[in-house]
Image (spheres, grey):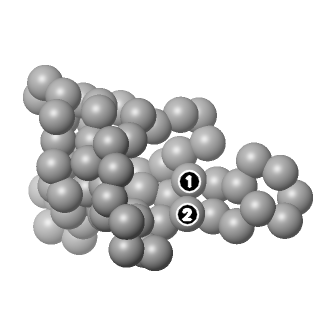
Amino acid sequence: MYASVGDRFVVHGRTVGCPERHGVIVDVRGVAGSPPYVVRWDDGHEGLFFPGADSTIELRPAREHARA
């Protein structure tokens, strides 16, 4: 998984009733866009994040156009 500052993470709930979490990457600590990432979650807290299988990346619009 590779990401850059400004991309957003969506972490899907693992059980019924658990809401999704959304956050934006504010720093990339890994080499060449790899994990770990510092993420500012929509509830305001920031933390070091290692994405799992329940996570997806939403690319910032500028990067989506660059890949097309």
16 displayed left or right of 51? right
> Tag 2: Cα neighbours inside 10 Å, few (<14), some, or many (≥20)?
some
> Tag 1: Cα neighbours inside 10 Å, few (<14), some, or many (≥20)?
some
Do the residues bearing badges 2 and 1 touch, measured as CB atoms within 8 Å? Answer: yes
Nearer to the camera, 66 or 36: 36
Q: Is residue 68 visible?
A: no
Image height check: is 15 above or below 17?
above
Q: Residue at x 71, y 55 (%)?
A: 13
Q: Residue at x 50, y 58 (%)?
A: 10
Q: Residue at x 26, y 48 (%)?
A: 38
Q: Residue furthest right?
A: 16
Residue type of the residue flagged with mark 2: Arg
Residue type of the residue flagged with mark 1: Val
* Image quadrant assignment for residue 41: bottom left
Local secondary structure at mark 1: strand
* Image quadrant assignment for residue 35: top left
Q: Which residue is mark 1?
A: 11
User: Going from the N terminus, do you reach mark 2 or mark 1 first?
Assistant: 1
Could you tell me residue 57's position as x and y percent?
Answer: 41, 52
Q: Residue at x 26, y 56 (%)?
A: 25
Inter-mark Cα distance, 2 to 1? 5 Å
Q: Residue furthest top?
A: 31
Which quadrant holds the N terminus? top left
Image height check: is 22 above or below 31?
below
Q: Which residue is mark 2?
A: 21
* Image quadrant assignment for residue 58: bottom left
25 displayed left or right of 42? left
Q: Tell me, for residue 43, which label it has, or none.
A: none
Q: Is residue 16 visible?
A: yes
